[in-house]
Image (cartoon, rainbow, N blue to C red):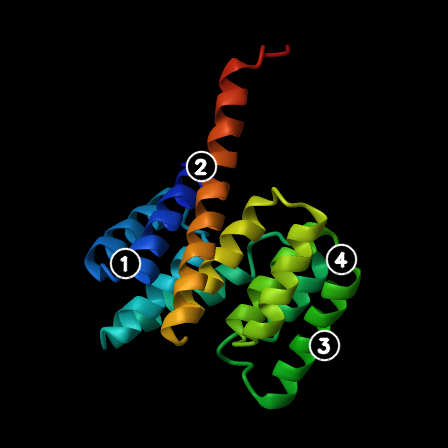
Amino acid sequence: GRENRKEGDRLYREAMVLYSLIGDDQGAERKFVAALQAAPSHTGARRHYGTLLANQERKSEAIHQLRMLASAATTIPTSPLPNMALSFCTPQASNASELQKAREVVALVALEGTVDDLSSAAALLHAMDQDDSAQITFERALSMHPNHVASLTGLADLLAIRSLASSPRSAEEMHQRALLCYSRASSLLQNEDSANLTRTPSY
């Protein structure tokens, strides 16, 4: 059947709150699995589910998720420049020069891209552990389009993950910001759903 991306996004945001902000791995796993059932090509859900499995030493399950992620990356239509960067990020292409090429492509997107390009570039920077650059790029996307749901969710994910390795004071600030971003993204999607329900269909 057709992917239910909105349902996948909703479950993914709930999973990230449980995983990163509350520390409920069991609850998060249920939500990640449900998100991937609703939207199998949801790369964020698959990436973070793989991380959760790896952290629990469930290596074969984690590797399966990462293989699925690598194969999905070649089939999801995205704008060409982030897609070029993605081609350098597969498990087979992980040497330093290829990662450097990927970073250069992503940097070009961050300078010249649309808001969707910026959001894709930021997600790739995060996947390459370039979290400072990723955060700046998400924030740049949101300065162009403050209601860009993918950027709000991506920035929330990044802040939630970064908070785990931060000092208590910084972690608390990142938690609060992540929750605000998740909450804003959810309310924007709910408003969009309400508008779609009340809109007169055109034939």
Mark in the foreground, 2 or 1: 1
Which residue is pictured at 80% across the width and 61% down the height?
A: 112
Q: Position of residue 128 (x, y in %)?
A: 54, 75
Relative depth, front residue between 104 and 133: 133
Residue identified by numbered label 2: 2
Residue identified by numbered label 3: 104
In the image, taking residue 48 as reference, residue 122 lies left or right, namely right
Relative depth, front residue between 91 and 101: 101
| Mark with earlier residue (2, 1) | 2
SS at circle 3: helix
How far apart are the two marked residues, 3 and 2, measured between alpha carbons? Answer: 35 Å
In the image, taking residue 108 as reference, residue 131 lies left or right, namely left
In the image, taking residue 35 as reference, residue 202 lies left or right, namely right
Residue identified by numbered label 1: 22
Q: Residues within 10 Å of mark 2 (few under 14, many from 20)?
A: few
Q: Residues within 10 Å of mark 1 (few under 14, many from 20)?
A: few
Mark in the foreground, 4 or 2: 4
| Mark with earlier residue (4, 3) | 3
How far apart are the two marked residues, 1 and 4, measured between alpha carbons? Answer: 35 Å
Mark in the foreground, 1 or 4: 1
Which amino acid lies under the numbered mark 1 shown in the image of this protein? Ile
Which amino acid lies under the numbered mark 4 shown in the image of this protein? Gly
